[in-house]
Every structure is written in C-alpha cells, then in structure tokens.
Image (tube, rainbow, N blue to C red):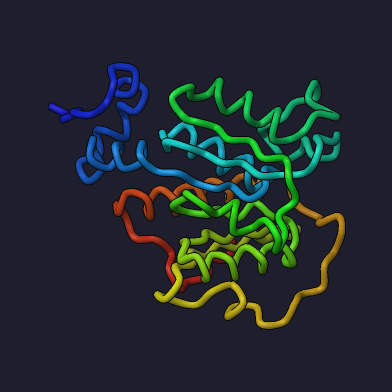
Amino acid sequence: MVKTEGLSEDEIERYDRQLRIPSFGAEAQIKLKKSSVLVAGVGGLGSAAAIYLTAAGVGKLRIVDHGEVELSNLNRQILYSTEDIGRSKVSAASEKLKSINPNVEIEAVKEQITEANVHDLLKGVDVVVDGQDNFKTRFIINEACIEDLKPFVHGAVYAFEGRLMTIIPGKGPCLRCLIPQDPKQVTPVPVFGPLPGIVGVLEALEAIKLLTGVGEPSLGRLLII
C-alpha cells in the first residue's frame, strides 16, 4: 500500500508510478509540491526540462525567456508547434505546461537575463536550471547562484555533444571553475535535434534529486554525452 497523505486524489493518480518507487513515495512528492524551480530559458534544453519538471509535479515553475518562436526552433524545442511561430516563447510554453499539469503554478517572465535582473529572478526559487544557448548569460546566472546560494543545474549542447553538471555553492566547483576563460560564441549554435532533449531531461532529473533528496546528483562531475 502506497502512503499518500498530503496529496489530492488527482495527484495520487497522476504521480502513481513515481509514488510506487520505495525510496521516493509521498514524502518526496510533497517536497516537490512545495518546491519552486527557475528554468532560465525555454529553448531546446529548457523545453525538455520544463516539461518533465511539470509532469513530475514541482509546485511552481518560473520560466524566463525573451524570445519568440521561430521555424528553426522546431527541430528541438518540443514545447512549441508550427502554430506558435511568432508567439512569445514563455506565453506558448506556459499554455502547454498548464495543459500538461494544471496543479503546477507557471510563472512566465518575458525578459532577457542580465546582471541587473538576475537576483530578482532567483528570489524564492530552490533550484535553477540552465536553458541557455550562450555562456555570457550562463556566467551571469552562475555568479548570481553562488552569491545567493542557489543550486544550479548546468546543461549545454553543441552539434552532437552534450554536457551536464550540478553546481551547489560551497560544495564543489562552479561553472567558472570549469571554464575559466570565456569560450568563443558561435551563433546560431549548431545542434542535432534530439540532443537538447536528452540533456534537458537529465537536468530535470538532477533538479528533482536536489529538491527531494532522493538519488545522488552529479555534483562536481561533468557528464559528457
């Protein structure tokens, strides 16, 4: 018998398969329900991460992106369809995520992440997920997470290669430790469509580990796919 105190009937049925995991159960699910995650960019990486965080039952998801949906996004940004072309990404993403799981509060912020607003965007969240396509913004987020003591799940893709690392301030290396010099930025970033999905799903998994305490996050270890 799966113990489900603190969850609604809808939540019990919706999360049934993960509630049946002995090391997870209602306790971990309630931790997710009380948690808040910032997905910093809802492109290829952020789309996959946001979908699985929403489906898993995080309490609140703050999605931040300043862009609009373009046709060239659709080989990898699975939150969007052809009908969304020209729409704000956060608006289209918010609608899709709410349809996946209406129990999750979705906060859509149409802004570019900068040094001026990053600390405000981090307020009230428990974990930050990297959905960026450039290292300039990643370093801004990395530094803010260190200052604000926020765990940061870093993910990146290029061509056929993906990378993943979980950063917890004071408990291991940060992104700048890993990459001390600013890498040359290639725009637009060449990428094979399925790869951001793979890395984004792994980012969601890392975030869930951090939020629930179930499983061992990839702390201080760079996973290369």
Quarter of the picture holding the N terminus: top left
Q: Which residue is at the front of the view, 79 or 147? A: 147
Q: Which residue is at the front of the view, 149 or 168? A: 149
Residue at (75, 77) in percent of width and height: 182
Residue at (82, 73) in percent of width and height: 184
Q: Is residue 23 above or below residue 180?
A: above
Say whether residue 2 is left or right of residue 110: left
Say whether residue 8 is left or right of residue 95: left
Instruction: Name the quadrant containing residue 14.
Output: top left
Residue at (63, 36) in percent of width and height: 108
Q: Where residue 105 sits: x, y (%)?
A: 49, 30
Residue at (30, 54) in percent of width and height: 213
Say whether residue 16 is left or right of residue 53: left
Q: Is residue 134 above or below residue 222?
A: above
Instruction: Name the quadrant containing residue 115.
Output: bottom right
Q: Where residue 27 sits: x, y (%)?
A: 23, 40
Quarter of the picture holding the C terminus: bottom right
Looking at the image, which residue sits at the far left? 1
Q: Which residue is at the front of the view, 124 or 173? A: 124
Q: Where residue 66 sits: x, y (%)?
A: 77, 44
Say whether residue 163 is left or right of residue 22: right
